[in-house]
Image (cartoon, helix red, strand yellow):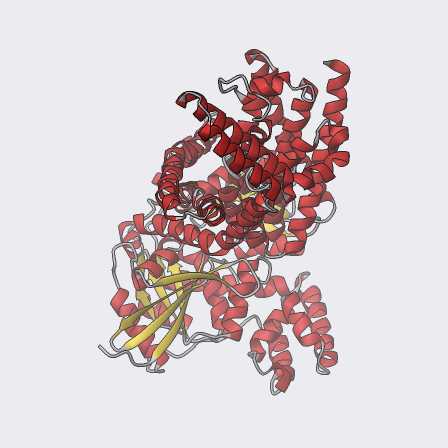
């Protein structure tokens, strides 16, 4: 599924980053690559962007950008 | 102490890694700010003298990676390659080591002489993180010096090591990062092709090979023109096929994954984190600040506070400055008996300098506020909260604060767009700011609404004008984003850094830098523009008029009237002369020439003159109207301008509305134009923009005027 489809509190692992090149580069430079496990922390008050957390880092991204990140949701 | 050899060092690191604090700790007061050549990325440079060396420090912009996507990244990379400093100091945010090491691996690939400042070591210790520095040094192939810029820990040790690295007196061998075998063999193959290519002398061949495999467009452009490209291109295609066959992926991905694997290995080997994810103070703050219900109100409160700080606190300071200039002018006036000279000095030069300086309090206060928000970590949150709204108009969440600041004054607002990283986003934001009705336009609205509307309607009219500005601004943003500025909008992928208490020096230093930059860069431009506008509204002198003036004066002085009567007559005479002189001047003639063009908007030549002089500053529209209309009131008591306008047959409610719309939208004042030019870098977009705003002003004023004529 796509990262943009996750709900607040969900935990997931990145399976692929498919965004267009500049966005993809930026996402990967932040350390969000295949295999990274993260948690959806919150969604902005107006519903977009969303915030995820991994390795002690908090990252905000628009749902638009999150659509390009394929993930596997993890239970628990 | 004699100063011997010079060592040039550059600080490189992620945003929020404490690089700027370290820069301040190293160089203290010896700093200057310029721009990197050709771009509007700020270049902070400073120096210090240490153990007989002069160490020149360049603070590179904060970046996450050396890829060529943002102007900051391109500038940093170009700088490291074209003007390699003697030593690069890679500043790492100790508590967030893993992410910070991505840049370090890229410095390793670039094979520059570098060492690591493991910054915020105090926080590392507080959090109970243990870092095996010796082992990490071996892996990264460089010296690592624990520092804390805030607590001045490790600064001398860092400098000692800088000197050692510059003398090549090091114990740690450079290390290379190797990729998985199939990628590594492609890297080596292409490296071999690129080695001993004299045209590519400036570059390190292995780095070029890696970048080509990463699809780096800048490096592509560089290498493409040489004969060797034919061979290289084939090798790249091979690598792509291999990656697809073996991993269903691309070399670019594999290289990134291998860098991360290297970092993960290094972290496992050298760093012990206390187990479990602890909720930090930042998390608790965000639970409130980014709360679904509270997030927006808190954001609006912060914006309101910044606005109040800048303008409410700034206006008495502005008033003080104006008062001071008034005193200076009246002190100088008696020393200049020649009337022409006096006018040049007082109305031209002193007024011009005053016109430049008057913006300083706002600029300084705004940047104290903004750098506090930026350094504390709230700025990123602000963008997070409001991005949805801004994105709808093709803007970035960070555009909001500069835009709102525009309601106070465009000058600091335009400068505040520097918080935006993407050039396109910056340009668009700069171009909508002047439509946010600034404080200087307010006197115009106050005058016209007071003259033509009852108080309750006046408030609505005023609100409508502000709203119109916002609508035109956002509409302009949409059009720009859909047409000329379609390309590369900045992806919204942004770190929300941990909250930190900003240091006093860094906040004030930012404000000082902005103030100096404004004075040096925009100040001269504004000054000359103000003087030009003064000249066109005062010259040529009307000789005949001046002759009448002196005979009349003599006549009044010699007559047998009471003293009070004489003073009154003299004042009236002065006003009439002033008004007629203005009509005679270039500005006055321009007003008349313009009349046919602005007639459809309900304006006569007198308004035309006010619009010309209003380019100096929008509030001048009011004082010019005052000068022009001051004639024809010979009944003694000074009549308020608003009642003169109300009774003037050429002025109506429709004219008033049309004029308000025109003043709201037409070409920004010369000060704003000057700052715009400095921030954009070129004249062309600024001139195009001026033409655009003039056309929009004309069209909307026309529509408003015609509608008002029908309805009122």
Residue B651 picture quarter: top right
Q: Nearer the viewer, residue B654 or B474?
A: B654
Which residue occupies the foreground of this view, B255 or B417? B417
Q: Nearer the viewer, residue A67 or B658?
A: B658
For the N terminus of chain B, give its image quadrant.
bottom left
Compared to residue B574, the image places residue B189 above or below, namely: below
Above or below residue B407? Residue B77 is below
With B465 as the anchor, is B119 left or right in this view?
Answer: left
Q: Position of residue B116 (x, y in %)?
A: 37, 67
- Position of residue B377 measured from the top left corner of the image (x, y, whole percent): 42, 44
Residue B306 location, quadrant: top left
Residue B95 image point, x, y percent: 36, 53
**Which residue shows up at 62% across the image and 25% down it?**
B465
On screen, residue B585 versus residue B6, left or right, reads right
Q: Nearer the viewer, residue B26 or B674?
A: B674
Residue at point 73%, 43% (across, down)? B482
> Residue visible at 64% across and 80% down?
B189
Residue B489 showing in the rendered view:
yes
Q: Position of residue B443 (x, y in %)?
A: 53, 28
The answer to whether B39 is drawn above or below residue B663 in the figure is: below
Quadrant showing the C terminus of chain B: top right
């Amino acid at each position: 599924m796509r990262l943009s489809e996750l709900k607040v509190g969900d935990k997931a692992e990145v399976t692929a980053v498919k965004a267009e090149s500049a966005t993809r580069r930026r996402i990967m430079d932040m350390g969000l690559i295949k295999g990274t496990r993260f948690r959806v922390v919150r969604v902005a008050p107006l519903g977009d962007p969303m915030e995820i957390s991994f390795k002690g880092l908090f990252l905000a991204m628009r749902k638009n950008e999150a659509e390009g990140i394929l993930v596997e949701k993890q239970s628990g | 102490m004699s100063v011997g050899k010079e060592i040039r060092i550059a600080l490189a690191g992620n945003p929020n890694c404490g690089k700027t604090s370290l820069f301040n700790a190293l160089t203290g007061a010896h700093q200057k700010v310029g721009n990197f050549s050709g771009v509007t990325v700020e270049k902070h440079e400073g120096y210090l003298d240490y153990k007989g060396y002069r160490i020149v420090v360049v603070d590179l912009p904060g970046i996450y990676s050396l890829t060529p996507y943002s102007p900051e990244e391109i500038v940093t990379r170009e700088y490291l390659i074209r003007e390699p400093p003697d030593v690069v100091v890679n500043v790492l945010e100790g508590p967030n080591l893993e992410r910070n090491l991505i840049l370090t691996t890229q410095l390793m690939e670039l094979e520059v002489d570098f060492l690591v400042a493991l910054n915020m070591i105090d926080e590392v210790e507080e959090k109970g993180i243990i870092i095996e520095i010796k082992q990490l040094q071996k892996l990264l192939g460089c010296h690592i010096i624990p520092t804390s810029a805030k607590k001045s820990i490790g600064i001398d040790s860092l400098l000692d090591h800088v000197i050692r690295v510059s003398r090549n007196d090091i114990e740690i061998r450079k290390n290379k990062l190797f990729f998985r075998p199939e990628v590594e063999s492609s890297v080596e193959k292409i490296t071999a092709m690129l080695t001993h290519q004299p045209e590519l002398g400036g570059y390190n061949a292995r780095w070029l090979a890696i970048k080509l495999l990463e699809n780096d467009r800048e490096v592509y452009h560089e290498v493409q023109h040489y004969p060797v490209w034919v061979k290289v291109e084939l090798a790249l295609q091979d690598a792509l096929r291999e990656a697809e066959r073996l991993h269903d992926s691309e070399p670019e991905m594999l290289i990134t994954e291998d860098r991360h694997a290297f970092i993960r290995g290094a972290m496992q080997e050298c760093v012990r984190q206390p187990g479990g994810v602890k909720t930090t103070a930042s998390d608790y703050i965000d639970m409130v600040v980014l709360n679904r219900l509270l997030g927006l109100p808190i954001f609006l409160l912060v914006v309101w506070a910044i606005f109040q700080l800048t303008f409410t606190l700034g206006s008495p300071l502005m008033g003080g400055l104006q008062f001071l200039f008034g005193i200076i002018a009246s002190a100088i006036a008696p020393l200049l008996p020649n009337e022409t000279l006096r006018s040049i000095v007082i109305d031209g030069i002193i007024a011009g300098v005053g016109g430049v300086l008057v913006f300083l309090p706002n600029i300084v206060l705004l940047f104290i506020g903004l750098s506090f928000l930026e350094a504390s970590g709230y700025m990123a949150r602000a963008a997070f909260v409001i991005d949805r709204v801004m994105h709808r108009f093709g803007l970035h969440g960070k555009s909001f604060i500069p835009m709102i600041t525009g309601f106070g004054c465009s000058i600091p607002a335009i400068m505040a767009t520097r918080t935006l990283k993407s050039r396109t986003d910056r340009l668009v934001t700069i171009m909508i700011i002047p439509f946010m009705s600034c404080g200087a336009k307010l006197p115009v609205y106050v005058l016209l609404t007071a003259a033509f509307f009852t108080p309750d309607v006046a408030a609505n009219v005023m609100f409508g004008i502000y709203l119109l500005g916002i609508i035109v601004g956002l509409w302009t943003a949409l059009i720009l984003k859909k047409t000329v500025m379609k390309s590369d909008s900045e992806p919204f992928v942004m770190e929300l850094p941990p909250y930190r208490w900003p240091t006093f020096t860094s906040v004030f230093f930012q404000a000082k830098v902005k103030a100096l930059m404004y004075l040096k860069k925009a100040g001269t431009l504004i000054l000359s523009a103000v003087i030009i506008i003064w000249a066109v509204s005062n010259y040529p002198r009307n000789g005949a008029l001046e002759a009448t003036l002196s005979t009349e004066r003599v006549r009044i002085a010699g007559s047998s009237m009471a003293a009070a009567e004489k003073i009154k007559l003299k004042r009236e005479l002065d006003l009439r002369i002033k008004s007629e002189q203005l009509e005679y001047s270039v500005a006055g003639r321009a007003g008349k020439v313009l009349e046919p063009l602005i007639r459809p908007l309900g304006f006569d030549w007198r308004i035309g003159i006010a619009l010309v002089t209003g380019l100096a500053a929008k509030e001048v529209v009011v004082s010019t109207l005052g000068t022009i209309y001051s004639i024809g009131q010979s009944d003694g008591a000074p009549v308020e301008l608003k009642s003169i306008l109300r009774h003037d047959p050429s002025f109506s409610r429709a004219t008033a509305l049309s004029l308000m719309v025109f003043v709201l939208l037409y070409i920004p004042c010369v000060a704003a134009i000057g700052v715009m030019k400095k921030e954009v870098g070129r004249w062309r977009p600024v001139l195009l923009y001026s033409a655009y705003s003039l056309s929009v002003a004309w069209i909307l004023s026309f529509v408003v005027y015609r509608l008002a004529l029908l309805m009122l």
